[in-house]
Image (tube, grey):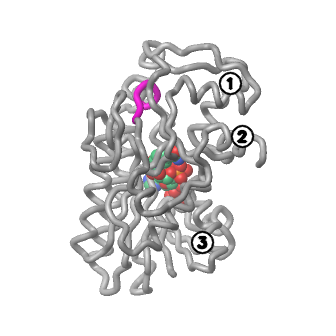
Amino acid sequence: MHILLTGGTGMIGRRLCRFWIEQGHRLTVLSREPAGVPARCGAGVRGIGQLDELKEEPIDAVVNLAGAPIADRPWTAARRKLLWASRIGLTEELLAWLGSRQQRPTVLISGSAVGWYGDGGQRTLDETCAPVSEDFASQLCIAWEETAERARDLGIRVVLVRTGLVLASEGGMLQRMALPFRLGLGGPLGSGRQWMPWIHIDDQVALIDFLLNRENAEGPYNACAPHPVRNREFVKRLGKALHRPAVLPMPGSVLRLLLGEMAGLLTGGQHALPSRLQDAGFSFRFTELQTALDDVFTRR
Ligand SMILES: NC(=O)c1ccc[n+]([C@@H]2O[C@H](COP(=O)([O-])OP(=O)(O)OC[C@H]3O[C@@H](n4cnc5c(N)ncnc54)[C@H](OP(=O)(O)O)[C@@H]3O)[C@@H](O)[C@H]2O)c1
């Protein structure tokens, strides 16, 4: 298969590239730094800076993961604009390019997050649920999904991957969360009762591959392990994996003072379940948080 990825140089994208290259697929990554793609994604992966570079070369699938990191800095007006343009703007570009082509891929797998539901409080959320509350992160995901869904009008199967917190050794939110723990300053955030859907990166790669190959898979899929935990439990398990205490709470009021609306990413959460993936027969390798964290922090 010839697979085009946006965000292929990111944490999830790099793992996907490695996995698919081993399977013998041909990969092209759209990147702001195309020359650096082979070094970051694998020697056989081609980098392009513009979609037009592909001309009418046949593409079998598109995986759309690009987007400026959501939790890197506070959401100033300029940051919100960048977060929006790098996802919705880029997906619109992708749609216009797909529409202009004679040959079209059969499937578009497009990124999203469990944040699509907003802060779900204590409600259990599967893919039949509507958003519970609205904040900037949920608006971003809703608009990102709606834009990607327009590819259906072009005869393309559209899959939306509502990802939880990805547990990986090479970066992301988990490694940032781990920093205060390493200094002995870790503990629950806010009330500690908020739910944290999580997923091991190996399962994230496996489920994207599963959805790529399952010809009747379409629409939204919660990409999170079947046993989400509350923040209090998560930090306890993280402390255990790092052999550090997890007793210093960080009050929600301090987080809000430091991070503004972005604090909601930490003080709110979703009790999301991967119902559609399980119904489709996907089996998770990592279902227990402690095993997943131990794998990320000790075995790699
Ligand atoms: N990791 C998680 O826990 C998690 C959870 C939920 C949802 N997600 C979503 O899933 C997607 C992939 O996650 P990830 O962790 O692999 O992301 P990542 O490591 O932050 O990589 C995202 C990629 O997006 C591109 N990008 C960054 N800023 C951009 C900008 N201003 N304009 C255009 N492109 C830009 C970059 O590619 P180039 O530098 O090559 O252009 C980058 O490699 C993201 O959109 C993320 O929001 C991730």
First in sequence: mark 3 vs mark 2? 3
- SS under mark 3: helix
- Asked if residue 38 is positioned above or below residue 276 in the image, the reply reads below
Q: Quadrant of residue 181?
A: top right
Visible in this render: residue 68? no
Residue bounds of the magenta highlight: 265-270
The mark lying in front, picked from 2 and 1, is: 2
Residue type, label 3: Trp
On whether residue 267 falls in the magenta region, the answer is: yes
Residue type, label 2: Asp
Residue 181, label in figure: 1
Q: CA distance from mark 2 to mark 1?
A: 15 Å
The mark lying in front, picked from 3 and 2, is: 2
Instruction: Give the residue displayed 46% in from the left and 70% down from the top.
Output: 212
Q: Position of residue 184 (x, y in %)?
A: 72, 19
- SS under mark 2: helix
First in sequence: mark 2 vs mark 1? 1
- Asked if residue 226 is positioned above or below residue 20 in the image, the reply reads above
Q: Which residue is mark 2?
A: 294
